[in-house]
Amino acid sequence: MTLASVGSVKTAPIGSATNVHGRSLAWLAVPALVFFIAFGVIPLIGVLALSFTTWDGIGEVIPSGLDSWRATLTNPGLPHAMWVTFQVMVLSWLFQTPMSILLGVFLAGAQKYRALYSVLYFIPLLLSSAAIAITFKALLDPNFGLGTGLALPFLNQDWLGEPTLALGVVVFVVSWQYIPFHSLIYQGAVRQIPTSMYEAAQIDGAGRIRQFFSITLPQLKNTIITSSTLMVVGSLTFFDLIYVLTAGGPGDATRVLALEMYKTGFQGNLMGPASCIAVILVVVGLLLALLFRRIGGGDETSSQLEGA
Amino acid sequence: MASAAVHGGRFRSINWAAGIFSTFWLLIVMLPIYWIVITSIKSQAEYFVTNPFVPSSEPTLDAYRLVFEAGIVRYFVNSVIVTIGAVIPAVAVSFMAAFAIIRSKPNRFIRSSNSVFLMGLAIPLQATIIPVYLIIIRLHLYDTLLALILPSIAFAIPLSVLVLSNFIRDVPNELFESMRLDGASEWQTLWRLALPLTRPALVTVTIYNALLIWNGFLLPLVLTQSPDLRVLPLALWTFQGQYGINVPAVLAAVLLSALPILALYVVGRRQLLSGLTAGFSK
């Protein structure tokens, strides 16, 4: 709509000269388009194409019909990786969402100490996943780490050696890394809730908790949907953090889909099946995004995503 | 002002629950950071015998010396080359594309370019890594820094175009019109009007992309193999493999790798945080 209005205004007063410029301007989009097609669109189509081939990562790419798909879908590693991915997705959502909302509401307040807190809260956002994983790996050392430091022996677990604990650690570290981002989003959203709503509630004698549940939370509905979409779809692509923290282990306890793809392709030299897993990742991601959009009721989510 | 009034009103009495909860989370956030800092100035021997959370009684820079001897400067330079080499072209082509999308005659080419970029927002880098690897091999770029730069540029484009075009769209059309009436070409309006007015958004996308690329791990893992070409996140990972037992050294490397970003945070916290939620909320 904006495009159309800009165009019509432009053509009116200046006439044919604008058309010349209009056409020459369009070419400004070409460099970006070339880059993005070469390393974004073609790979996306390419991954689908490669899923119907056999390739060891070094030699020739040989078309092989449905062989790779058959191998992928009959591999017991796939349902396992999907299950692990699902667990990480759901558990980290369950942990991150309430924490992020509470911290976001907290940070939206105007008190001085909250401003100081917020400076420190956002530090995890600055660190690379590799740095975070390395830090926690060392910090969770059963002999020289957290438990010893705090003199709390129950924290001296073999955190990364026990399958259940390792999964819990992954969920925790993921949350540690991303809660700041989501609280930042909630902070912005809370600040946009109209003052008058709270004033009215106060006149009606609603307390702090009541205000939270009957004003803040409903007003955050769209933000919750958007933030959840980012969390859930984003959790499909967790790779760096888990690869460095556990490498999928112990055994295959934390081997999520993205890791399964990497290991199949780049360590097992089975690029065909790895491409099948990549296709599954894309399709699941799109389905989840659509699902959340449906929950959000139409295109409100997308307009938020587009910064409108 | 308005928001201060709201929240002042909302929290008239002191909110103990919020204070305790937020302080607890602050401890969880800061404990690992604090631990990185104090451990990096312990000697290796001291690490094994002292309480992990008590600062060293005789601080030493041994860990840092080891990290420098292990060649972190090289990895640092690689990271700088890749980050600058990718961010500047990415922001430049994105700005040009955003300008074209908003200012040119809305033809089919522009419309479909726009939808390609919007679709690009949904493509996860991880899912395309295998074909990217194949393309890089075929271009004979495997194991070069350029191999990291090219895909990084591509994946920075969709969000940058989105943020910048939203911003250029907000420039009042009258400004463009009056400049045109004064005889400026569209190209001149790009340089003299759109570029200066879009500066905040340019800073935002530059910071956002720089952070992402500086911290990137998968592309270097897959597209390079020479030790000489390691960027920082990859170097950290190999450090841990090599010096895993020397925790102070590993943590010194972690700290050094984050230093430029932390410095940026100190200088431009506001831009950095708005960069992180760019395209998502204004």
Image: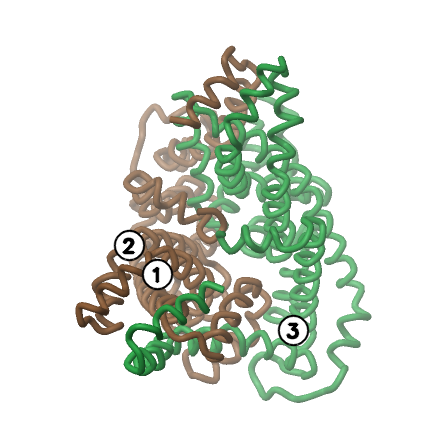
Chain colours: A green, B brown
Q: Nearer the viewer, residue A27 or B269?
A: A27
Q: Determine the secondary structure under disc 2.
A: helix
Q: Nearer the viewer, residue B16 or A171?
A: B16
Q: Is residue B226 visible?
A: no
Q: Nearer the viewer, residue B184 or A174?
A: B184
Q: Nearer the viewer, mark 3 or mark 2?
A: 2
- Residue B46 picture quarter: top left
Please indicate whether residue A191 sits to the left or right of residue A206 in the image.
Answer: left
Residue A275 disc label: 3
Q: Name the residue rendered at 65%, 89% in the picture.
A: A62
Please indicate whether residue A74 sits to the left or right of residue B112 in the image.
Answer: right
The amino acid sitting under disc 1 is Thr
| Chain identity of mark 3 | A
- Judge whether B52 appears above or below B126 on screen: above
- Judge whether A176 appears above or below B184 on screen: above
Q: Position of residue B115 (x, y in %)?
A: 52, 70
- Judge whether B266 appears above or below B160 on screen: above
The amino acid sitting under disc 2 is Arg
Query: Which residue occupies the extreme front position in the image?
Result: A13
Residue B230 disc label: none
Circle 1/circle 2 CB separation < 8 Å: no
Q: Name the residue rendered at 31%, 47% in the picture.
A: B260
Question: Which residue matches tag 1?
Answer: B83
Question: Which residue matches tag 2?
Answer: B199
Q: Name the residue rendered at 77%, 57% in the picture.
A: A80
Q: Name the residue rendered at 42%, 21% in the picture.
A: A111
Q: Nearer the viewer, residue A262 or B188?
A: B188
Of callouts 1 and 2, the N-terminal one: 1
